[in-house]
Amino acid sequence: MDKQAVLEHLQREEPFLWINPECRSVDRVLPKLPLQYADILDAETRLERFAPLLADLFPELEKSRGIIESNLQPIPAMAAWMSDQARGHLPGQMLIKTDGNLPVAGSVKARGGIYEVLLFAENLATQKGMLAPDDDRRVLAEARAQALLRRYTISVGSTGNLGMSIGITAAALGFKAVVHMSREAKTWKKEHLRANGVTVIEHAADYTVAVAAGRAAARIDPLTYFVDDESSQALFLGYSVAALRLKTQLVQAGIRVDRDHPLFVYLPCGVGGAPGGITFGLKQVFGDAAHCFFGEPVQAPCMLLAFLGGFSSPRSVETLGLEMDTAADGLAVGRASGLVGQMVRDLVSGLFTIDDDSLFRFLEALYRTEHIRIEPSAAAGFAGPYFVTFSLPGRTWLQAGRLSAYMPKATHLVWTTGGRLLPTAEFTAMTRRGADASLTFLNACC
Ligand SMILES: Cc1ncc(COP(=O)(O)O)c(C=O)c1O
């Protein structure tokens, strides 16, 4: 499909799969990137150093001793339902990551957001002579360090979930926390933050504007640290740690990943940090045996647009006439992160778009078949296995990569990314909408 045809698809808000012609073998890509495997290990070690402090701050982390991780879960009943919908067998094993259940923040944004807050606290206390490299990080909860942290503000611009992750952690550590929320942010997320001592600033504009407002406010206040979702290496590395954890989980589950047993991973994408960081980690860990696809709402395909137009100055979807009017609040982003794009440009196999009706249908089906609660954004990955298996671009790509024969031995990993904190009344309304909806994207796919 040439670039003009892709742009027309985007403008018409039609779900489709785009295969990335720049995707290359990891041997050619990874050595040239500014971040390396050692950086992921460094982030993992830092999270381990902080685990005892996190376990003290958040009682829900007691059992995992301060490690924030989600389960890898088979979903046989949902997989059977998915095959029924396509009226064709989806070969391979279907699993999900349940990041919606991540403790503390209830979404994929927990790993990166919490990581960056910890990194800032560690750097600050070290600079002020209150922390030595080998010190127990629990000294940060003591009076002397608390007097320091209280003077600083950590702020962030968010559609909701990054704000939850940064705001809750920053406030628990003793910082002042300010979250600039875009118009998409749900009322219950704002209330949850305020209940946790976070200041919420509401913007009647989109995510890009909320981030810019937060960035500008922080620039004039030397005691404010701004977490920049559009260009943060720390967030990116925090997300990437998921890949190390996934490797252990796959080994424990006896699931092989190699050339003959490909791993297909489907990640919802907003600004790109979470799916980008995870993809970078997965490629480091599994090499070319991992194939990563990003899913975006048809109303906000900002990363796909950036893949087409370049990452030095990513174009906004508003230039296509799209209004970002989607129920997938976490993915309602107009302009992708250039930093993330540059990191994963040659690592992502493809991107697909999905309509809201289909998101609600998947949300309802996952709850009915597996009793797992997700929010609409978190459902975007479920379209991935269909696009790869059944669509013309998907089948052509599988054949070109000599993957078709291995599909029965493949693992499809749908990364579900949020939902645990959804109030029951909101969730029930969503399942009702889903029960009446259909998988509209299938018309374009199968
Ligand atoms: C539930 C959910 N899934 C996925 C994403 C996408 O993450 P990113 O914006 O880093 O691409 C978000 C972002 O907030 C989210 O809230």
Image (tube, helix red, strand yellow):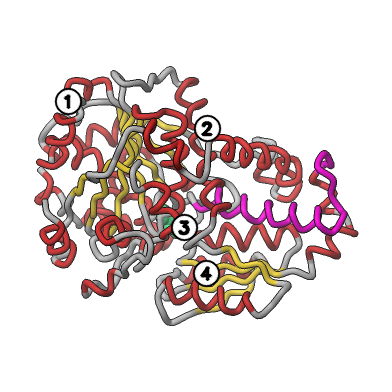
Dot 4 alpha-carbon crowd within 10 angstroms: few under 14, some 14 to 19, many 20 or more = many
Badge 4 amino acid = Gly
Label 2 CB less than 8 angstroms from ligand 1? no
Badge 2 element? helix
In this rendering, the answer to whether 44 lies above or below 171 is above
**Residue that badge 2 annotates:** 244
- Compare marks 3 and 1 and give the one earlier in the sequence: 1
Badge 4 element? strand
**Does residue 134 show up magenta in the picture?**
yes
Badge 1 element? helix
Q: Are marks 3 and 1 in contact (CB under 8 Å)?
A: no
In the rendering, which numbered label is found on residue 113?
A: none
- Compare marks 1 and 2 and give the one earlier in the sequence: 2
Give the quarter of the image for residue 262: top left
Badge 2 amino acid = Leu
Q: Nearer the viewer, mark 4 or mark 3?
A: 4
- Compare marks 3 and 2 and give the one earlier in the sequence: 2
**Residue that badge 1 annotates:** 404
In the rendering, which numbered label is found on residue 422?
A: 3
Q: Write the start and end of the magenta stretch as one range.
A: 109-136
Dot 2 alpha-carbon crowd within 10 angstroms: few under 14, some 14 to 19, many 20 or more = some
Badge 3 amino acid = Leu
Instruction: Determine the CA span between mark 3 and mark 2.
Output: 28 Å
Quadrant assignment for the C terminus: top left
Badge 1 amino acid = Ser
